[in-house]
Image: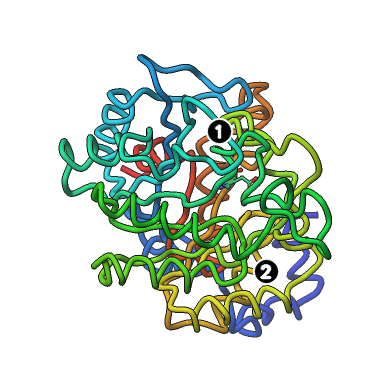
Amino acid sequence: MTLLELETHQPLIVNRKSQILNRPRRLRATPAIRAMVRETELNARDFIYPLFVRHGEGRSEIRSMPGVYQLSVAEAVREAEAAAKSGVSAVILFGIPKEKDPIGLENFSEDGIVQQAIRAIKKEIPEMVVVTDVCLCEYTDHGHCGILNTGEHFHTGLPEGYVLNDETLDVLAKVAISHAECGADIVAPSGMMDGMVSAIRAGLDFAGYENLPILSYAVKYASSFYGPFRDAAEGAPKFGDRKSHQMDPGNVREALREAAIDVEEGADMLMVKPALAYLDVIRTVKNAFPQLPMAAYNVSGEYSMIKAAAANGWIDEEKVTLETLTAIKRAGSDLIITYHAVDAAKWLK
Ligand code: PBG
């Protein structure tokens, strides 16, 4: 039976058109209308591009992160130039030191690898916003994010090997000041030590950097999505895990507590990390602290999953990446730290 015949047999259907008042599809009819009513739109300026800097020459690809490299200082400048050309306005630096020791001395050394990279990037591309990760794990021989409870630092009452909070704060403040002296634009403490924002704020202010913003990794989970990063930055813990300072994945009330503490301590921007498995946390923190810019870290494991599926031809890399980044922004993140930054910026053009 044709539609016409159907209507003559069942005339009620004729009236149906006027009964449907709400047709959301009207606003999806053409690309131009869809663009007019789009609520969340990505921009290259939303992205912060991570760079891994190491001593020596050239670049070496990270096995578990196709398209991401450990870079010499000169290569880091080249990569930052490519980022700037694509419209990305910020990078975040991670360093792989020449030598590791229990405290991580290169972390605050004048000619440490990150210090060299900051100076070189700011010299060649002054408008590039250089963010630095402030943590101990890439620099310590044990791979932990702080000074350990052992040897001369041993406290009875705390387990052997525990990451000591307050001793670590002194080092974090030193690292932040050292980055500031080289010209860093923003420091981003990622170690989840209690009081880290206050300690860094006090150190920076004392050293005359009261205008240098702190982007706090306020809400950072003990996540298995960091696996590939630990290859990239060579910062995996030699024993144990990071559960005594990073958050339990089941918790969101605690995220509000962490964020509130960091706001009180003077954080200028907050971060939630990882992003994809924590979109609800991004939204919750954003709603609670709408007055601060929010960042989310689209971490290494999230990147590698897309790259692996795309390499197998199972998903469309460009579309899935842009959809993922849109979701992170829609959840409430103003800024996204992402290894996809340069590709995504090019695709958006
Ligand atoms: C700590 C740090 C880590 C990441 C960023 N900063 C590793 C960790 O906490 O173990 C992970 C980022 C990623 O997975 O992309 N310096």
User: Quick one: label 2, few (<14), some, or many (20+) residues within 10 Å?
Assistant: some
Mark closer to the chain start, 2 or 1: 1
Mark 1 belongs to which amino acid? Ala
Q: Position of residue 106 (x, y in %)?
A: 44, 37
Q: Is mark 1 within 8 Å of ligand 1?
A: yes
Q: Residue at x 75, y 44 (%)?
A: 224
Q: Image check: 83 left or right of 220?
A: left
Q: Position of residue 26 (x, y in %)?
A: 50, 69
Q: Residue at x 39, y 57 (%)?
A: 187
| Helix, strand or loop status at disc 1 | loop
The C terminus lies in quadrant: top left
Q: Camera-side residue: 98 or 75?
A: 98
Q: Is residue 307 visible?
A: yes
Q: Tell me how far mark 2 sits from mark 1, CA to CA.
A: 28 Å
Q: Image check: 78 left or right of 30?
A: left
Mark 2 belongs to which amino acid? Asp
Disc 2, disc 1: CB below 8 Å? Answer: no
Rendered view: 304 above or below 215: above
Circle 1 residue: 233
Task: Tell me the tag on residue 267.
Answer: none
Circle 2 residue: 280
Q: Camera-side residue: 146 or 14?
A: 146
